Image: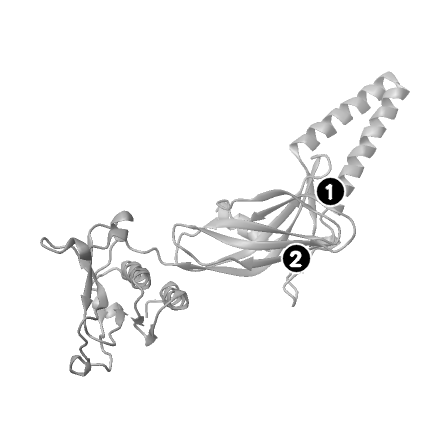
């Protein structure tokens, strides 16, 4: 019920829209302001001073009371003015795996000569890590990285950002909401271990078409260690990453590729299959071989190698809808 009430009131709040150039510009009617706890104490003290001065007809007390009231009004005005004419752009950061911290790049620019002090940025979630105390000089810009935990694969959206300030005296808090469409890609979490993928599964290069070449061995994949395997073929880097004993397999067949195929994994949980495929992608790239990806629904990534191929395959896995 509380979440429903909060969502209902959020629909009533004014948000700063993003224009065609990707910037959200704060105007006068989009800024909210309320007193802080310090401001409430300050107002209570001023009220007591006013009552005391009126009761004892103390003109000096009244003068000092009105002086404090003027300071409070100026602080309220400057807190509101500190957010006016700021332009904000929100972009998604680099792709990360589930369990890591996703980042969003927020650029704040002052569109006037006046500097803006003590600017803080908060995401619309309690698990975000806020950035605060930012100074933006006149006609300058500052870049802030906002981080959120990546809890599930796919596109992590950042629907709104709250920008706030307590400047100049922490008596008032002014804030406004920025509507964004920024997203960050979240890869599936790689499994600790993965079975060796199929070689040339369904490829046009059949075994009878392969050529033999003496003295040349190609990497065919990896498999779990078996008693009697040569220590020279153990993947010691995998051991250092605490993935257990894994043995590299080599052969003399030319033109072989590794196919990472959904149908070759006999696992009931689709998310577990995606995790195993993600591990196979990383292993194949680490060993420097060409690999392709097959997923249900006709999703096929042709064999290739390198960082671009890793990103393409992991993107297919992150956005896989299970159909």
* Residue that protrudes farthest toward the front in the picture: 215
Tally the numbered discs: 2
Q: Residue at x 84, y 29 (%)?
A: 67
* Residue that protrudes farthest toward the left in the picture: 228
Where is 272 relative to 55, above or below? below
Q: Does the rendering let one see residue 171?
A: yes
What SS does tag 1 mark? helix
The answer to which image quadrant residue 284 occupies is bottom left
Residue 68 image point, x, y percent? 81, 29
Residue 122 image point, x, y percent? 57, 47
The answer to which image quadrant residue 107 occupies is bottom right
Quadrant assignment for the C terminus: bottom left
Where is 304 relative to 28, above or below? below
Say whether residue 203 is left or right of residue 181.
left
Q: Residue at x 88, y 18 (%)?
A: 58
Say whether residue 248 is left or right of residue 76.
left
* Residue that protrudes farthest toward the top in the picture: 56
* Crowdedness near tag 1: few (<14), some (14–19) or many (≥20) residues, C-alpha within 10 Å: many
Q: Residue at x 36, y 67 (%)?
A: 313
Q: Nearer the viewer, residue 304 or 141?
A: 304
Q: Residue at x 25, y 76 (%)?
A: 255
Q: Which residue is mark 2?
A: 16
Q: Which residue is mark 1?
A: 79
Residue 268 image point, x, y percent? 22, 61
Looking at the image, tell me whether mark 1 or mark 2 is earlier in sequence order. 2
């Amino acid at each position: 019920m509380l979440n429903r009430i909060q969502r209902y009131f959020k629909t009533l709040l004014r948000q700063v829209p993003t224009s065609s150039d990707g910037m959200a510009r704060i105007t006068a009617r989009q800024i909210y302001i309320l007193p802080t706890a310090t401001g409430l104490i300050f107002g209570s003290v001023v009220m007591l001073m006013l009552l005391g001065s009126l009761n004892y007809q103390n003109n000096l007390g009244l003068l000092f009371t009105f002086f404090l009231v003027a300071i409070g009004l100026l602080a309220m005005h400057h807190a509101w003015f500190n957010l006016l004419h700021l332009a904000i752009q929100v972009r998604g950061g680099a792709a990360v795996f589930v369990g890591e911290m996703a980042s969003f790049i927020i650029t704040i620019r002052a569109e006037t000569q006046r500097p803006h002090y003590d600017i803080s940025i908060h995401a619309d979630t309690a698990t975000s890590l806020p950035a605060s105390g930012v100074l933006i000089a006149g006609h300058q810009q500052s870049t802030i990285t906002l981080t959120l935990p990546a809890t599930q694969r796919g596109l992590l959206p950042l629907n709104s950002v709250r920008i706030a300030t307590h400047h100049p005296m922490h008596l008032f808090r002014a804030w406004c909401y920025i509507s964004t469409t920024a997203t960050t890609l979240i890869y599936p979490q790689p499994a600790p271990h993965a079975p060796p993928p199929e070689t040339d599964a369904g490829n046009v290069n059949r075994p009878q078409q392969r050529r033999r070449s003496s003295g040349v061995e190609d990497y065919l994949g990896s498999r779990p260690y078996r008693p009697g395997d040569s220590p020279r073929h153990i993947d010691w880097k995998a051991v250092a990453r605490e993935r257990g004993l894994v043995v590299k397999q080599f052969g003399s067949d030319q033109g072989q590729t590794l196919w990472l195929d959904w149908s070759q994994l006999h696992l009931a949980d689709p998310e577990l299959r995606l995790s195993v495929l993600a591990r196979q992608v990383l292993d194949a790239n680490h060993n420097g071989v060409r690999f392709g990806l097959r997923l249900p629904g006709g999703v096929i990534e042709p064999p290739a190698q390198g960082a671009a191929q890793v990103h393409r395959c992991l993107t297919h896995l992150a956005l896989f809808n299970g159909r």
